[in-house]
Image: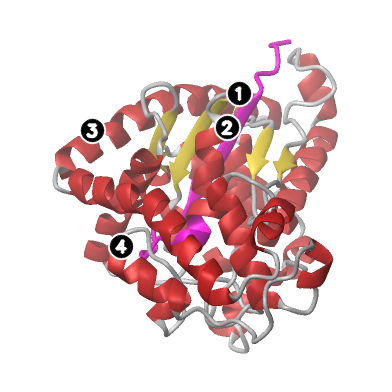
């Protein structure tokens, strides 16, 4: 039996307007994980088309996410960066998982209910089966860990359910092939940090989102220093000064959000932020947050713009990453076909 490689997989959808929530909730952590794990980071373009996308914009957004990965510090030579649609194993394994997962499991997925809304009958089959493709993304590389936000925990639990059912359904075949008791690992979530779920700057009860009608609800990774400063200073707050302890943030969602953003950008804790700024007025705290956000995000936006000026270089990175990902994916598909009983050449 082959040794289990401790491997991280995660992806970002290329649907435009990458923002602070994407950075703090995902990409910043991707960068940190490079130090301790073999990492595969994917631009999940097949997920993006579960709802209609303008083809030209989709191509631009795929490259923009790639530029963001690199601008934030992901090393595409030491690790693997690619776009999902270049590796056919994602779609192949997703179909096999469509035949393993149960309808009842998918019916319980809260994200489908939220995204489909009241008109569920008009939602695409792809949107409904999205979690099976996510499971295929992860398990195609037999990833042991996935950095996820709180809103993706349910999908990762489904990935574990699919892995367990596959291992159980084909246990005899798996054992006969020398893979021990289970072929797929039970992938563990990595949920950490003071701002894993970044909320809107206009409403602390809503997640920061590119789909929000107000551009002042989010800080885009491409915003310049003036835009960042304006958005932070206009962020919704309450009339009370900042508390000196975390307990004082309860019932104050906007204050909690801004403190969490500061802590995540400064690589510290909410407690430490409140020790430094407790009892301060928001005008003072926002000034410090502006300086911090501009210092951390300004260079990322500038580097993204530079990278987007050479699309052929971005495409070369994606092609190289896809080639390296395909080596791992093809071996998984070969083994899975043998386990399931599919005849291959």
Residue 311 image position (x, y, % from top left): 17, 44
Q: Which mark is residue 33?
A: 2
Which one is in front, 273 or 194? 273
Say what secondary structure mark 3 lies in: helix
Work out how far the residue at label 3 is from the one at label 4, CA to CA, in angstroms: 31 Å
Q: In this rendering, is residue 28 above or below 276?
A: above
Work out how far the residue at label 4 is from the one at label 2, CA to CA, in angstroms: 28 Å
Between discs 1 and 4, the one toward the N terminus: 1
Q: Which mark is residue 36?
A: 1
Badge 4, how many Cα within 10 Å: few under 14, some, many 20+? some
Q: Between tags 4 and 2, which lies in front?
A: 4
Work out how far the residue at label 3 is from the one at label 1, CA to CA, in angstroms: 26 Å
Between discs 3 and 1, the one toward the N terminus: 1
Between discs 3 and 4, the one toward the N terminus: 4
In the rendered image, residue 271 lying in the magenta stretch gets the answer: no
48 vs 255, left or right, is left
Residue 321 image position (x, y, % from top left): 37, 30
Residue 18 image position (x, y, % from top left): 40, 60
Q: Which mark is residue 316?
A: 3
Query: What residue range appears in magenta?
Result: 1-22
Residue 254 image position (x, y, % from top left): 63, 76
In the rendered image, residue 10 lying in the magenta stretch gets the answer: yes
Circle 4 sits on which residue? 225
Which one is in front, 307 or 142? 307
């Amino acid at each position: 039996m082959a040794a289990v490689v401790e491997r991280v997989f995660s992806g970002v959808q290329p649907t435009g307007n990458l923002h602070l929530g994407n950075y703090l909730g995902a990409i910043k952590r991707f960068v940190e994980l490079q130090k301790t794990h073999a990492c595969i980071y994917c631009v999940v373009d097949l997920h993006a088309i579960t709802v209609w996308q303008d083809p030209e914009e989709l191509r631009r957004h795929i490259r923009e996410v790639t530029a963001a990965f690199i601008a934030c510090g992901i090393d595409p030579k030491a690790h693997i960066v690619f776009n999902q649609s270049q590796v056919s194993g994602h779609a192949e394994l997703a179909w096999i998982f469509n035949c393993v997962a149960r309808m009842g499991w998918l019916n319980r997925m809260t994200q489908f209910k939220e995204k489909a809304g009241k008109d569920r009958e008009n939602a695409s089959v792809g949107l409904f089966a999205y979690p099976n493709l996510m499971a295929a993304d992860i398990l195609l590389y037999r990833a042991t860990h996935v950095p996820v936000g709180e809103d993706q925990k349910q999908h990762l639990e489904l990935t574990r359910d699919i892995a367990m059912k596959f291992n159980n359904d084909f246990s005899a075949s798996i054992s006969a092939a020398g893979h021990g008791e289970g072929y797929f690992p039970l992938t563990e979530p990595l949920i950490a940090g003071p701002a894993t779920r970044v909320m809107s700057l206009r409403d602390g009860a809503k997640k920061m989102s590119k789909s929000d009608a107000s551009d002042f609800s989010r800080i885009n990774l491409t915003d310049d220093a003036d835009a960042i400063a304006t958005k932070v200073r206009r962020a919704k707050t309450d009339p009370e000064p900042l508390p000196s302890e975390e307990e004082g943030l309860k019932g104050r969602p906007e204050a909690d959000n801004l403190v969490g953003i500061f802590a995540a950008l400064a690589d510290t804790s909410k407690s430490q932020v409140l020790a430094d700024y407790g009892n301060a007025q928001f005008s003072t705290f926002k000034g410090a947050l502006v300086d911090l956000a501009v210092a951390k995000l300004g260079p990322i936006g500038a580097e993204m713009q530079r990278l987007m000026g050479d699309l052929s270089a971005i495409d070369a990175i994606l092609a190289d990453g896809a080639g390296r990902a395909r080596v791992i994916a093809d071996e998984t598909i070969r083994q899975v076909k043998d386990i399931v009983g599919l005849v291959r050449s």
